[in-house]
Image (cartoon, helix red, strand yellow):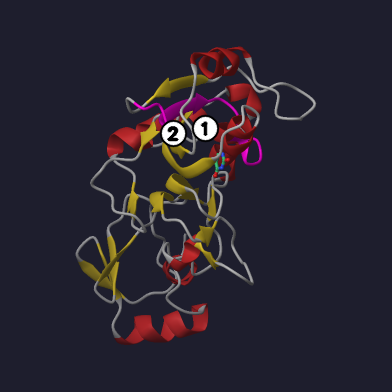
Amino acid sequence: MRLDKLLSDRGYGTRKEIKKLLSKQGAVVNGAIVKDPGYQVQESDAVTFQGEEVSCEQFQYYLFHKPAGCVCANEDHVHQTIFAYVPNPKNTLFSVGRLDLDTEGLLLVTNDGKLAHALLSPRRHVDKVYFAKLDLPITDDDIKLFSEGVDIGDEKLCMPADLARANEAGDEIRITIKEGRFHQVKRMFEAVGKEVLYLKRESMGPFTLDDSLPKGVYRTLTEEELSFLETYTNHTKD
Ligand code: URA
């Protein structure tokens, strides 16, 4: 990709503005100053512009710890969106699936539609693990019903879900679901007469939220996490 296009795509200005900036200060590519806007950047190049590292990868992947109070949308007239936290200057990024306004936890943000499709495809049965606090403790009957497939009023029953107590009282739980229906976890508990008071997604497929990532903060993927992506897409990575 051309250097001016890369910098423009990353939100540093229009191509015209970038050409001007490059002619004055240049960018640093693999340690050398480059002023040519048409310089062909490779994915493996290390680019710094205005003192910031610029990712040259075609696809961008971020793991975001979504806080409550923001919506998974690119625009919303009422609520703050996740892009108040994750910079999205060219509006090319989107979240892989959605969490409700009041749900916290792991969210993948990317510009890779193929990955999003693969992770969300109902046929893939990607495990999603949620931690929840309920108004009432779960029962053994709830665990059994969830393992068989609970009826939440859709055409089909939910796929079997693994439900387990996360505290002694049983009003804190961990649930693993393989689908991503609208308000699914809340509706599953509603079906057994319980209300979800707090909900957090802890993992999605091979991606796990670790304690080191505070709420409202995003990070790039680790090498290991990037290698998981190949399981879901056919993008080849060097
Ligand atoms: N299930 C829900 O009910 N809400 C979410 O945000 C995610 C799963």
Label 1 crowding class (10 Å Cα cut-off): few <14, some 14-19, many 20+? some
139, 87: nearer the viewer: 139
The residue positioned 40% from the left and 51% from the top of the image is: 64
Above-or-below relation of 22 to 217: below
The residue positioned 27% from the left and 58% from the top of the image is: 46
**Residue 172, position in %: x, y?**
40, 33
* Quarter assignment of residue 55: bottom left
Write the start and end of the magenta stretch as one range: 169-184
The residue positioned 47% from the left and 72% from the top of the image is: 8
**Tag 1: residue type?**
Thr
Classify mark 2: helix, strand or loop: helix
Classify mark 1: helix, strand or loop: loop
- Which image quarter has ligand 1? top right
Q: Which residue is mark 2?
A: 229
Contact (Cβ within 8 Å) of mark 2 with mark 1:
yes
Q: Which residue is mark 1?
A: 233
- Count the numbered circles shown: 2
Where residue 105 is drawn, which disc sits there? none
Decide if residue 180 is in sight here: no
The residue at the far right in this view is 155
178, 173: nearer the viewer: 173
111, 130: nearer the viewer: 130
Indicate whether residue 156 is drawn in magenta: no
**Tag 2: residue type?**
Leu
**Residue 2, position in %: x, y?**
46, 65
